[in-house]
Amino acid sequence: MFKSCQYCGGIHETTYECPSKPKRKYKQNKYSEVNGEIKRFRGSTTWQNKREDIQQRDLHMCQVCIRLLYDWCTVQYNYENTSVHHIDKLSDAFDKRLNNYNLVTLCPCCHTAADQDKIPMNILLDIARQQEDNGK
């Protein structure tokens, strides 16, 4: 079966790849190497073990809610769906990815607020320092 080619105006078989067809250009993300490294790290056993250590240190509770620092914290002892937050973003400070003083357990609401810089970094760093120093 033949068809008219929209690229060269000729007639080709349907399975024919016209050389006039423009090649697709893929954008090269300047952060693609860093993002790949971050993705591999998040799936690693090292991170899974560190994440569990930090959650145990923080008793699986949101460390912002327990301190009642913000109005959106309606439950003081929030332990549902908590996750470990990197205070210095992985893309900015990959070398601090396993530093206990850079990690804190947060609920989804506080985690989103921290990612949007609604919770100042210095407050989160103070919380992580307090938690780490209390555990010693």
Image (cartoon, helix red, strand yellow):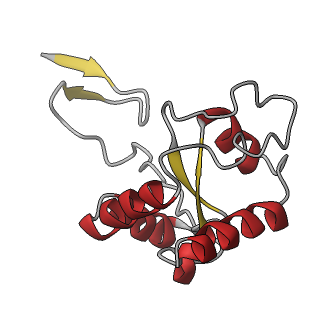
x, y (%) of residue 76? 69, 33
Question: Looking at the image, which is closer to me, 16 or 27?
Answer: 27
Question: Looking at the image, which is closer to me, 24 or 111?
Answer: 111
Quadrant in which the N terminus appears: top left
Question: Looking at the image, which is closer to me, 108 or 55?
Answer: 55
Left or right: residue 43 compared with residue 108: left
The residue located at (80%, 63%) in the rendering is 121
Residue 29 in view in this figure: yes
Left or right: residue 93 compared with residue 136: right
x, y (%) of residue 20? 39, 46
The residue located at (39%, 42%) in the rendering is 21
The residue located at (44%, 48%) in the rendering is 24
x, y (%) of residue 77? 62, 34
Q: Is residue 105 above or below residue 32?
A: above
Q: Is residue 16 above or below residue 1?
A: below
Q: Please count the marks in the image.
A: 0
Most extreme residue toward the bottom is 95
x, y (%) of residue 89? 64, 65
Left or right: residue 105 compared with residue 6: right
Residue 39 in view in this figure: no
The residue located at (48%, 53%) in the rendering is 25
Left or right: residue 116 compared with residue 29: right
Q: Is residue 40 above or below residue 10?
A: below
